[in-house]
Amino acid sequence: MGVWRMIGAVVLGSLGLGGIERLVGGGEPVRAMLVTTAANGLDDREAIVRSCREPLTERGWDLVELDLERSDGHELTSTLAGAGAVVVSGGDPYRLLAAMRRSGFDRSIGLALARGVSYVGVSAGAAVAGPNLRPLLDVNPFPAPANQPLDGLGLSDTLVLSHDERTGRRERHAAAQREHGLEMRLIALRDDELLLSGHPWRLLNATEGVTIRPAEVADAAAIAGSYAESARAAWHHMFTDAQLADLNPPVEAWGKRLATLDDADDLVVVEDHSGVAGFVWCRPSEDLDLDTGHGEIAAFYTRPRLWGRGTGLRLATYALDRLRAAGHHTAVLWTEERNERPLRIYHEMGWRPDGAVREREYLGTKIRELRHRMVL
């Protein structure tokens, strides 16, 4: 993905910009405006700004730093006119949003995006780009001033929940998904991740070198192939080699499923350098003994080359957040009772059998599946 792919883009991150090379590739250096306002008044101000500045200058970006609380409208206009990107650092999102309103940045950035300037927001800079900051009130450590409007810039239809791996954040992000998920899309990001906002959106993980995105109908063959490759590698204790060799990727079934999805975000794929390498599909549970408050992880597979890298756990975390956001209070999944590797992982995540069992034949062999539950 070269610089040209960033024209007019909205890129949202959680901490640093170490994965920015996945967006700019080997293209020409970018001249950018670095907005440092959110870090004002914080003891670690310089460290916050440096986490944005250094990854970009190391890649040849030409940065002009600007503090919206200390700059007049002329300086903002002239600096923005010469920039190909605007980078907004982390810190206090409420202070940043107020300064954006007072300075006229909120109006200028929309015009800049229309002429091809990209917006790169980090932590607070990512949050203010979304539709509204209200879900952050019980998440981040900064108090919102009384009577401050919390409407964001609306550059993205997604509110980023930053620093998902930090102590206490996962629980607070889950609560935000439960309370506000029906109002707007919320996506929790780890500090090594970037979200390329848009339709479709893309989540870039710099550490694992993978991308998560909504699945498309054209992905049917790759999704079916991921399922088949995973099954052949993991199910030797349940089926013979001959049976597994006869396992045909169900391309037609996945094509029909993708064509009839109610929400594209309910089925996402993960891609690496070789293409689609796994997927997760979540939906309301179809079990007749459960009420509408139960969601289900209906299918969840990754190719063996991703095993042990944490990518599967990242997909599962995404799926659980989706179910919370849809208003489900409990999640369920089914897996064969001899499926040792996923059973171990599910147990570590907190899934527990609820006593429900279903039996059926698959590949000419009788299988026995156990239902697992997790309170969301």
Image (cartoon, rainbow, N blue to C red):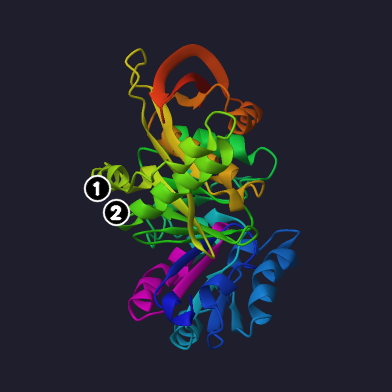
Q: Residue at (60%, 34%) from the top-left corner? A: 171
SS of the residue at dot 1?
Answer: helix
Magenta highlight on residue 106: yes
One can see residue 194 in this view: yes
Q: Position of residue 86 (x, y in %)?
A: 50, 75
The amino acid marked with disc number 2 is Val
Q: Which mark is residue 336?
A: none
Q: Residue at (62%, 28%) from the top-left corner? A: 340
User: Is 238 left, or right, of 157 in this rendering?
Assistant: right
Q: Residue at (39%, 47%) from the top-left corner? A: 224
Query: 110 and 330: which one is in front?
Result: 330
User: Is 168 left, or right, of 82 in this rendering?
Assistant: right
Q: Residue at (63%, 33%) from the top-left corner? A: 341
Residue 89, by quadrant, is bottom right
* Distance (Cα) linking label 2 and label 1: 6 Å
Magenta highlight: main SS:
helix
SS of the residue at dot 2?
Answer: helix
Give the labeled residue for mark 2: 217
One can see residue 149 in this view: no
> Relative to residue 83, is residue 167 depicted above or below?
above
Query: 245 and 355: which one is in front?
Result: 245
Magenta highlight on residue 96: no
Give the labeled residue for mark 1: 259
> Relative to residue 122, is residue 255 depicted above or below?
above
Mark 2 closeness class: few <14, some 14–19, many ≥20 residues within 10 Å: some
User: What segment carries the magenta color?
Assistant: 100-124
Q: Are marks 2 and 1 in contact (CB under 8 Å)?
A: yes
The amino acid marked with disc number 1 is Ala
